[in-house]
Image: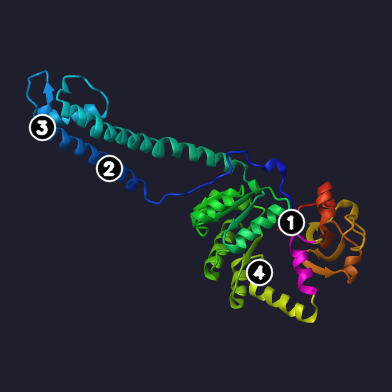
Amino acid sequence: MSRRPNPKLKLQQGFQTLRRAAKWPVWADLGARLGLAFALIAIVILVHWIDRAGLHDSHDGQISFLDVVYFTMISVTTTGFGDIAPVSDRSRLIEAVIVTPIRIAILFIFLGTAYSFVIKRTWDKWRMARIQAKLTDHIVVLGFGVSGSEAVKELIARGTDPACIVVIDPSRGRVNAAEAMGCNVMEGDASSDETLLDVRIAEAQSVLVSAGRDDTSILIVLTVRHLAPEVPISVVIRTQDNELLARQAGASNVINPVSFTGLLLAGSAQGEHMADYMADLAGTGGRVQLRERPISSEEIGRGLDQLASGGRGLRVYRSGKPYGFWEPEAQRLEAGDTILEVVNCEDCEAKPSPASKSTPPKASR
């Protein structure tokens, strides 16, 4: 169903990104940073030991290896007690040209480590909690390939706030592209329970699955249905033999782009304008648009050809069963009915649908 998300659900600017991005485990990243810092310290110790003749110890006048280690550590940490100091021109040049850049690099390593493992992680957890607290009635897109990205573009073109769309994809490039469109994003495995729970999958308005592979898509559908028994799931399946498996996994709608392309080709063989009109109905760029919505209170008792929107009614869904405009059931609309109608795109943008003016009973998912 094409519904406009509640404007109250819009996330605050600056808190629109869920992320799970880590190339290395935490321990490996921390170990690499500390290892690089100690390697640089070892280089400074070696340089000071080679040039120990240019150092002066005001305590006993002798420079031992322990004195070199001590001087290196207080020099790197910019403590500088002054008991050991470079006195020769060469030692001072080494301090200025070699040791000082290394000292700055070590400080950046420790500051960067503190930011990454303390400040940034704390900030990210707080920011994610803020987003999660406001995620409800949102649209979750699992897979941001060709089909997923086109679906998001079409949703935005139809008036859906990007802040009410959550995109999950394992590719960082695709995640960045979705984030640039204003969506909430998470880099991760969409078949993982933890990932789906993080985006509050059970509170979603609908879930769109397009993983690129039928087996992966079906696995994701199974996981989503397990965590969110009532949420509508639409999935892209490219092999006809897998359509039944996708429905058995819990998909509400199964879309086969190959079969749909075949239908358009067959239609164009019998009339040059049929494929054009079908594409016109499916998108927002044409003159007409196919829309699904619950009926408004003022339409109860009317026929499908007497819609308040002025659109052309095509089908009525009543208790899960479809009725065409020619059938007797479509001659009198009842509370709780959902209809398919064709509307003028200009009229659709100029005014909201009649259903949005009232609060119809919530249809069961």
Tell me residue 169's x, y (percent).
53, 57
Q: Residue at x 64, y 60 (%)?
A: 150
Give the tally of numbered discs.
Answer: 4
Instruction: Report the residue marked by disc 4.
Output: 255
Tell me residue 306's x, y (percent).
92, 60
* Marks 2 and 3, the one that precedes in the sequence: 2
Q: What is the three-letter code of the residue carrying label 2?
A: Leu
Instruction: Report the residue marked by disc 2.
Output: 36
Q: Is residue 56 above or below residue 297?
A: above
Q: Report helix, strand or loop for mark 1.
A: loop
Q: Residue at x 25, y 23 (%)?
A: 79
Toward which corner of the image does residue 245 lie, by quadrant? bottom right
> What whole-number distance in Å separates the C-alpha atoms at marks 1 and 3?
75 Å
Please indicate, yes or no, whether residue 360 appears anywhere in the rendered image: no
> What whole-number distance in Å separates the C-alpha atoms at marks 3 and 4?
73 Å
Disc on res. 2: 1
> What whole-number distance in Å separates the C-alpha atoms at marks 2 and 1?
54 Å
| Magenta stretch, residue numbers | 273-286
